[in-house]
Amino acid sequence: MIIGIAGGSGSGKTTLATRLRDAVGAERLVALQQDSYYRDIDTLPEALRASGNFDHPDCIDFPLLVQQLEALRAGHSVPVPQYDFATHHRLPTTTEQRAHPVILVEGILIFTHPALRELLDLKIFVDTDDDIRLLRRIRRDTRERGRSLESVLDQYAATVRPMHQQFVAPSQKFADLIIPEKANFDLVVELLSHKIRSLVA
């Protein structure tokens, strides 16, 4: 079973994915992040490099992500890439990931790619207000990635918000389930984990 969790930056995707993994059990569920599949900056189209736009679908190596999801579904282990956000390059090392009964993939753009959508047995979109997402992004990027408040706000205005409006928000039409940010996450996790366990028991 392959589950996709999409939503805007800072929407709560990773929180939901982590809680589902904890509820279902790490021995049954493996989570892949779209962010691991960013292309090297040298391989991006010049227009994206020049604008510092890393929220466009062309920035993601979707063919590799699809290939590795298919391999995991077939029961094979895969070498998941590692990406350095400071240099915007893929590291020479990878993380070996073995197959699990449930494969969860999360990221802002995963519903924008038709071949990837076809692999997803369940598509979940976490819908969160823009102001809440921005506050969460500021907190993450300043604390975890060492960025200044000004740089975070500049990037949000220049690329994050426009790409969300152009690609991310419209992709929720492909979702099987839309979860408002104000939803009772405890109940959502309980219901989803119960359904997942029943399918992979």
Image (cartoon, helix red, strand yellow):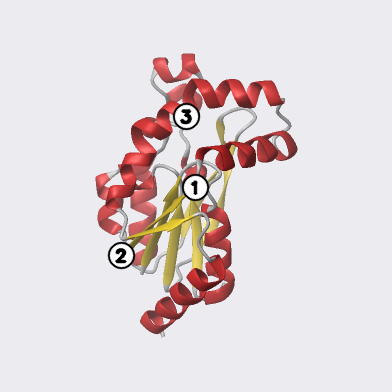
- Using a 10 Å C-alpha cutoff, classify the residue at mark 1 as few (fewer than 14 neighbours), some (14 to 19) or many (20 or more): some
In the image, is 171 to the left or to the right of 144?
left
Which residue is under mark 2? 121
Residue type pointed to by label 1: Thr
Query: With 95 as the anchor, is 56 left or right in this view?
Result: left
Label 1 sits on a secondary structure element that is loop
Residue 114 visible, this angle: yes
Disc 3 vs disc 1: which is toward the camera? 1
Q: Nearer the viewer, mark 1 or mark 2?
A: 1
As shown in the figure, which amino acid type bears the numbered disc 3? Answer: Arg
| Label 3 environment density (alpha carbons within 10 Å; few <14, some 14–19, many ≥20) | some
Residue sitting at x 45%, y 76%? 191
Q: Is residue 100 left or right of residue 135?
A: left
Rate crowding at label 2 as few (under 14), some (14 to 19) or many (20 or more) other CA atoms within 10 Å: few
Residue placed under numbered mark 3 in the picture = 161
Residue 54 visible in rendering: no
Of residue 184 and residue 148, the one placed in the foreground of this image is 184
Give the residue at mark 1. Answer: 128
Residue drawn at the location 36% of the way across and 42% of the way down: 62
